[in-house]
Amino acid sequence: MALDHAAVLALYDRDMREGARPDGPGARVERAGAVVRQTGGAHGWNGVLWSGLGEATADRVIRDQIAHFTGLGLDFEWKLYAHDRPADLGARLAAAGFRAEPEETLLVGEADRLARDPGTPDGIRILRATGPAGVELVVRVHESAFGTDGTRLRHRLLARLAADPGSVLALVALAGDEPVGSARMELVPGARFAGLWGGGIVEAWRGRGVYRALVAHRARVAAARGCRYVQVDASPMSRPILERLGFHALSTTTPHLYGG
């Protein structure tokens, strides 16, 4: 049966945006009028997850969110989707001082179908990171694959694993004892979607099936936990790979950052 894109997108908005739950210990999600936002503090994610704005109210609501987060001394993100309204919301955010990051594609796949992947490449084993040693391997791959500092990732993973280990799955792919890939998944009790994040492969191991194996492993866990779908905010590099695996593009999302 073909995926009903409009119905799944509406479900995603309800479950994962309007009905969002905190993504870590100490974070708070609240509905403030026409927006749903998370305040995660100095080490967490801060931003607007969902909005239901009209042309007459959008600018005022944008100013209110700027006042909320800057009043707490926090930089923040407005997670803007292509189907959000009003249609010129991105331009309004830019006029208010936000800067747009590169666009990503919201991809959704059916967990049970993705879980049927044939398996892990020869010579590769996939381990779950449950403590500091495993987290260090995940961070090591992240820094190598993406060329970015992993300090914040390390802090957030350790905090999540300590406070609510069932809400996050962190994986590392090993070739012998060498970490060559890593990936994460966030799980929300009762949600029909699991979020796939941070899938990265060190350069020498790309194109050898490690990325695909990490997707399938997470899909199996998601399906076992009762999630019908898995979701990715995909970069232009990962989108074609994921679409070949069976993901469907539902919308695009562009982070708009304020401060920093």
Image (spheres, grey):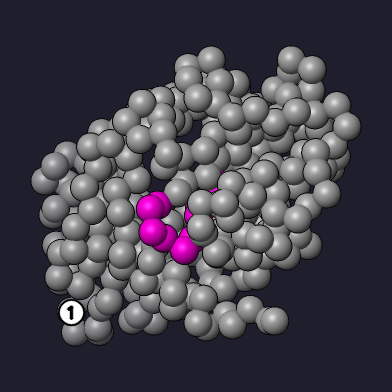
Q: Secondary structure at mark 1?
A: loop
Q: Position of residue 158 (x, y in %)?
A: 41, 25
Q: Quadrant of residue 20?
A: bottom left
Can residue 196 be found in the magenta stretch?
yes
Q: Position of residue 76 (x, y in %)?
A: 29, 48
Q: Quadrant of residue 155?
A: top left
Crowdedness near tag 1: few (<14), some (14–19) or many (≥20) residues, C-alpha within 10 Å: few
- Would you place residue 113 above or below residue 250 in this image? above
Q: Which residues are magenta?
A: 188-197
Which quadrant of the rendered structure holds the N terminus?
Answer: bottom right
Look at 63% across and 42% down and name the residue there: 199
Q: Is residue 226 left or right of residue 249?
A: left
Q: Amino acid at mark 1?
A: Thr
**Of the pair 235 and 102, the residue shown nearer to us:** 235
Look at 76% across and 60% down and name the residue there: 245
Residue 107 seen in the figure: no
**Of the pair 143 and 11, the residue shown nearer to us:** 11
Can residue 238 be found in the magenta stretch?
no
- Would you place residue 146 above or below residue 86 in this image? above
Look at 38% across and 53% down and name the residue there: 189
Which quadrant of the rendered structure holds the C terminus?
Answer: top left
In this figure, which residue is indicated by the disc labeled 1?
Answer: 57
Q: Is residue 91 left or right of residue 74?
A: right
Q: Is residue 10 left or right of residue 104?
A: left
Q: Position of residue 256 (x, y in %)?
A: 38, 57
Q: Position of residue 219 (x, y in %)?
A: 63, 52
- Would you place residue 257 above or below residue 210 in this image? below
